[in-house]
Amino acid sequence: MSIPIGAVGAKKMDKDTFQNAEVANYMADNFYMVKLDGEGKDPIEFKGKTYKFVPSGRKGYHEFAAALMQGKMSYPTTIFLDEKMNMLSPVPGYQKPKPFLEIAKYFGDDIYKEKDWKTYAGQGK
């Protein structure tokens, strides 16, 4: 599963990266994509726990987004989960199509089970 979390900043990544044909096809074949508004107000139940919106400052944040991003609220962030819904990694920031696809393949092709990211990324694929 892949969960892109964002607010306004995520729109550029939606347009440039997630609508890229190669990225879109790979993600559709290998992940179940769920878009989450990090400032959404509706409660979310996940693994037996209910996460809620927390008013804070001018806007607030959603507890589920904060949990997935390990408290480092940054938009956009894409979260990769394994088939058992365990978090593999948050990927913060805007990602262009080619680097994003490399990250997605690292998780989607289960390369993370055999190589650490530095080894994989340094191979020049």
Image: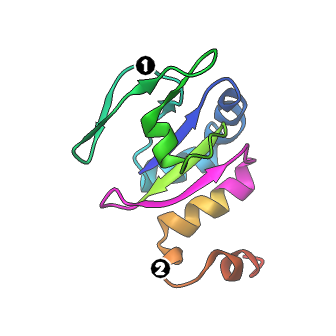
Q: Which mark is residue 113?
A: 2
Q: Report the amino acid beneath label 1.
A: Lys
- At x 67%, y 27%, the residue is 11
Whether 89 is among the magenta residues is: yes
CA–CA distance between discs 1 and 2? 36 Å
* Residue at the outermost front position: 57
Q: Which residue is identified by label 1? A: 41
Instruction: Tell me which amino acid carries mark 2.
Output: Lys
In the structure shown, which secondary structural element does the residue marked by tag 1 occupy? loop
Viewer-side residue, 66 vs 15: 66
Residues rendered magenta in the picture: 82-100
Left or right: 30, with 43 as reference point: right
3 inside magenta stretch: no
Name the secondary structure under disc 2: helix
Left or right, residue 33 beside residue 83:
right
Bin the neighbour count of mark 2 within 10 Å (Cα to Cα): few under 14, some 14-19, many 20 and up.
few
Residue ranking furthest to the top? 58
Cβ–Cβ under 8 Å for marks 1 and 2: no
Q: Is residue 34 visible?
A: no
In percent of width and height, residue 83 lies at 33, 60
Task: Note whether residue 58 is visible.
Answer: yes
Q: Quadrant of residue 102?
A: bottom right
